[in-house]
Image (cartoon, rainbow, N blue to C red):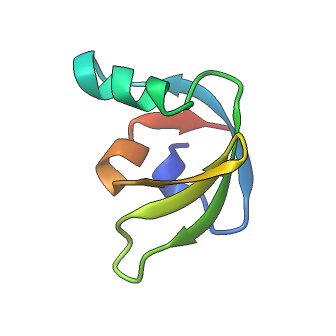
């Protein structure tokens, strides 16, 4: 399952970040690394962006970026 498929109010754990180069590095720099817990706080009315809470701060992710993050 990927982060963009998680429902609002659920907490998941990051397994892996797919992708390469600058995009993957940017996601990792924002704190999205293996085994970190992510709480899906809300989703915009049209589904993009997704707001998550990670390590005590809120983060908005594009749906395309969230699709690269595998979670359990």
| Residue 40 in the image, given as x and y percentages of width and height | 63, 59
For the C terminus, which image quadrant? top right
Taking the spot 73% from the left edge, 60% from the top edge, the residue there is 10
Residue situated furthest front in the rendering: 57
Give the answer, above or below, for where 7 lies relative to 39.
below
Residue situated furthest left in the rendering: 21
| Residue 39 in the image, given as x and y percentages of width and height | 69, 54
Which of the 4 quarters of the picture holds residue 8? Answer: bottom right
Tell which of 60 and 67 is nearer to you.
60
Give the answer, above or below, for where 49 lies relative to 25.
below
Tell which of 50 and 72 is nearer to you.
50
Residue situated furthest top in the rendering: 21
Taking the spot 58% from the left edge, 24% from the top edge, the residue there is 33
| Residue 71 in the image, given as x and y percentages of width and height | 61, 37
Taking the spot 30% from the left edge, 49% from the top edge, the residue there is 64
| Residue 54 in the image, given as x and y percentages of width and height | 66, 44
Q: Is residue 52 left or right of residue 61?
A: right
Which of the 4 quarters of the picture holds residue 14? Answer: top right
Which of the 4 quarters of the picture holds residue 7? Answer: bottom right
For the N terminus, which image quadrant? top right
Q: Is residue 43 left or right of residue 46?
A: right
Taking the spot 35% from the left edge, 55% from the top edge, the residue there is 63
Tell which of 8 and 27 is nearer to you.
27
- Count of labels in the image: 0
Give the answer, above or below, for where 23 lies relative to 4.
above
């Amino acid at each position: 399952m990927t982060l963009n498929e998680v429902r609002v109010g659920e907490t998941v754990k990051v397994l892996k970040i797919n992708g390469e180069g600058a995009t993957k590095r940017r996601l990792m720099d924002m704190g999205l690394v293996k085994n970190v817990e992510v709480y899906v706080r809300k989703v915009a009315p049209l589904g993009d962006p997704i707001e998550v809470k990670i390590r005590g701060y809120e983060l908005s992710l594009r749906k395309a970026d969230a699709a690269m993050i595998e979670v359990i």
